[in-house]
Amino acid sequence: MAEAIVLGDFPIDDDVLNLLVCSVSEVDADAAIMFCKFMIGKERLPSIQMLVQLCESLCKNGKGNEMWEMFRVLLDKGYCTSEREYHLVVSFLGKAGKVREAYDVIKEIKRKRLDPGISSYNSLMVALCRNDLLRPAKKLWDEMFTSGSSPNLQTYNILITKFAEIGESEQVQQLFDHMVQKGVTPDSTTYTSVITMLCQENKYEQAEEIFNKSVAQDPKLASSVLTVFIIALCKQGGFKTALGVMSSLPSNIESSNSHVILLKCLTDVEEIEMASEHIKWIRRYCSSAFQNIMNELVASLSTSASLQPVRKLVQWSYHMIPLVHFAKNAQRVLRLLEVRLQCITSQSDIDTSL
């Protein structure tokens, strides 16, 4: 069909051809690429929109080699004339795992004395990190500086996230310090990646130092980072540090959700005394948010894996006159939790017998 349409004597607009390829690519990537090759062979070049949709389909169907063949023909025909078009080629090659070919395109751009642009560098950096090619990623990082391309926030986050993932704490700290020195402002991704890694290595003081930088930078940002920080501390059993962080927060940091998370974690590990002391602290110093925090805590307790710690917290709360309402609500949750756990046990027994 592609050959008949492209080579036929009847007139057909390029826009119609592009729409046809887009439609075919949704159901048959092989047919779509054949259609596109016929177009290119007759000097009828694809639109950007069609190329994007076709490449999405090729990536989805693991047709990286076919994509590179098509791009190679387009590049030889001078299809790319701007940073945007070259970025499209580099980004889709990276997405398809064709990192060597993507790097060859960047070298080709530079040979033409054009600027690859930070977007193309970032696309290739993502592909290298995704494929655990860290040595080439570091080499690309150095090359960016020598070629005069300044890394942006995304560049730093790509590398920080990857190095944090594999526990390269020294590299992460160097990158964080470097971006601050260069005047690149960290965002939530930066802070949470660094803080999570430091908590995993039990470097709580350093994690708190990084968190305090987010507090100084922006209260709203710090609120979102705080939640991740408390979760990371609780996963490592750093409950005392978590309590210290929560009790030293400035008043302009929204912290209700983090209080709930901390109290739920303390209850789950049966640190009822620590949980009760923190509830007293919240009632004294966060009185306006106290009722909301307790209501959210009751709701979160319904997902507990064990009845015993919830019972202990309920028993403690009955002795606190201001918490009688909480205790009654928690009792209802306790009954529901008891039923849920019984159902799970019963289903497990049935599965075992089968």
Image (cartoon, rainbow, N blue to C red):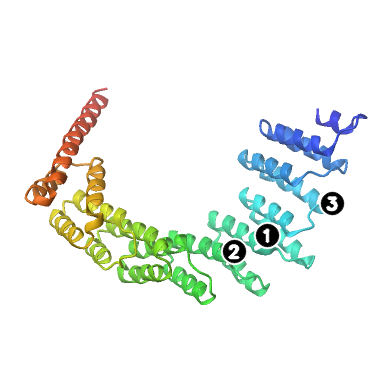
Q: Tell me the mark number nearer the camera, choosing from 3 and 1.
A: 3
* Residue hosting label 3: 77
Percent of width and height locating residue 294: 22, 49
Q: Quadrant of the N terminus?
A: top right
| Image quadrant in which you'd find residue 24 | top right
Q: Residue at x 83, y 37 (%)?
A: 38
Mark drawn on residue 167: none
Camera-nearest residue between 44 and 29: 44
Percent of width and height locating residue 346: 21, 27
At mark 3, the secondary structure is loop
* Residue hosting label 2: 136
Gap in angstroms between the C-alphas marked 3 and 2: 29 Å
Percent of width and height locating residue 281: 18, 61
Q: Left or right: where does residue 257 sit relative to residue 166?
A: left
Mark 1 in CB contact with mark 2 (< 8 angstroms): yes
Q: Left or right: where does residue 178 sit relative to residue 234?
A: right
Please say if 252 is above or below 182.
Answer: above
At mark 1, the secondary structure is helix
Gap in angstroms between the C-alphas marked 1 and 2: 10 Å
* Residue hosting label 1: 103
Q: Tell me the mark number nearer the camera, choosing from 3 and 2.
A: 3
Camera-nearest residue between 285 and 187: 285
